Amino acid sequence: MSDPLTEHDQALAALRTVAEAAGPYLEELPKRLVHDRSRDGLLAELDGPLPERGEGTLASVERLLRVGTEAATHSSGPRFFHFVVGGATPAAMAGDWVTSLLDQGAGLWATSPLAARAETVVLRWLKDLFGLPESFGGVLTPSATFANLTGLACARAWWADRHGVDVVADGLAGLPPMPVFSSGLVHVSTRKALQVLGCGRDSVRVLARDDAGRLDLAALEEALVALEGAPAVLVGNLGDVNTGDSDPLAEMADLAERYGAWLHVDGAFGLFAAVSPRTAHMARGVERADSVTADGHKWLNVPYESGFSFVKDPAWLGRAFGAWDAPYLPEPDEERINYNMLGPESSRRARALPIWATLRAYGRSGYREMVERHLDVSAHLGGLVEQAPDLELLAPVRLCVVCFRYRPPGVPEEELNALNARLGKALLSDGRVFAGTSVHRGMTMFRPAALNWRTTAADVELLVEVLRELGARLID
């Protein structure tokens, strides 16, 4: 085979091949091993030199499907509890297929009014879902890290402007370091964003009052007073990846207003606390933040790549990412929005379409029911841990993350970290359920997150069963 033009009539057949494979795969997904290491050998079939002459559309797609459905980590299934990852709702998955079918360039209104209008609509719907003011500006991003980059780029532009510098045009040269304050809950994606922005990965000053990383509000106020009116950036964290804990956002907003600071809130998955009356108190104050971020491929359950960034003053998005001095690009327009001038990407996928599909399909009540089901599943897991004689709950269950460790009777404290690390490797190798380890307060522990739309109580019951089974083997 050579030029794809010679196989233009194979496009529908290729899509039909994928659709036919999707049925059995989705039906078997809840029963599959999350990862079957015995299938890793199939990955070699993806390798080899670049073909001189291709094998053709259908043969290529069939090979990819055969290898993919067998060798993939089935993270879209109900028992992938690692890394705080959701799945893709039926509507979101279909919406993503539509996105590939239409292949819209979503950067400029002129390239796709459909993509631009869909993005405007879903940003409005998301603000409504999370209780953010409609006046906030926003943009869709590929991930929570890109969303943090977007919000913090606006913060950096604001901060430099306070010093009389246009950082977009002139850069950081000559400016003092940008003060950034947060708690011990600050995520690596915030640090990565600051690293990319030239502010420094380690520029965050952590003000924690205990070994769990909770924010020391008094120390934060002292730090702001010491700046003597100079601008600063506060980073509030809504949903810690180890415990589900959150910073006191309303109190941080009070300090930001009192001392003229910018408040950025990283709500990667925790922003969904606002969706349920049971957890909305955790998000209290987020509506007063200057920038807010969240991740779509977590609790929204849409396919990768999906994030959102909201900014109280929409003008900062344009100031941070627009004004390219490229005469062929259109001028900004409040109705016909060019989203590539509001975020870090130029060429952009129409990632609004799966979000539109899932929000249109299930609405506010559907997402509230899903979030509350996950809250119940996580609370159930916490109860199972507390009842088990060889497991120890290390933090209250606040959202969808459960923080615990394996602690069989008779094992000395100094040996528990190594034991839990070995158990974590054994669990991932076993493949029936996926939940990795992390470190909390110096303790190696598990932090499974139940936020896949397919996950039920039976799935976390299996997690406990498998962990205890494998743990017993390790100490025999």
Image (cartoon, helix red, strand yellow):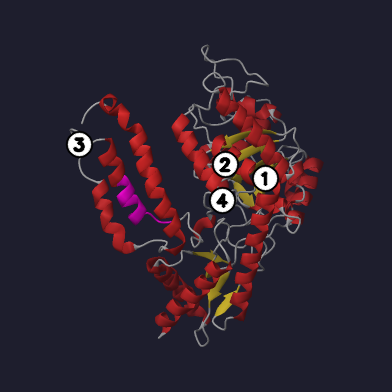
Contact, CB < 8 Å: mark 3 with mark 2?
no
Q: Which residue is mark 4?
A: 298
Q: Nearer the viewer, mark 3 or mark 2?
A: 3
What is the C-alpha distance between the residues marked 2 and 4?
A: 9 Å
Q: Is residue 101 magenta?
A: no
What is the C-alpha distance between the residues marked 4 and 3?
A: 37 Å
Tell me the amino acid under the disc marked 3. Answer: Pro
Residue 132: x %, y % from top left = 73, 41
Circle 3 residues within 10 Å: few <14, some 14–19, many ≥20: few
Residue 378: x %, y % from top left = 62, 66
Q: Which residue is mark 2?
A: 307
What is the C-alpha distance between the residues marked 1 and 3?
A: 47 Å
Q: Measuring 63% from the left and 40% from the top, which residue is drawn there?
A: 360
Q: Which residue is mark 3?
A: 51
Tell me the amino acid under the disc marked 1. Answer: Gly
Q: Measuring 40% from the left and 56% from the top, which residue is drawn there?
A: 73
Q: Which mark is residue 363?
A: 1
* N-terminal-most mark, 1 or 2: 2
What is the C-alpha distance between the residues marked 1 and 2?
A: 19 Å
Contact, CB < 8 Å: mark 1 with mark 4?
no
Contact, CB < 8 Å: mark 1 with mark 3?
no
Circle 1 residues within 10 Å: few <14, some 14–19, many ≥20: few
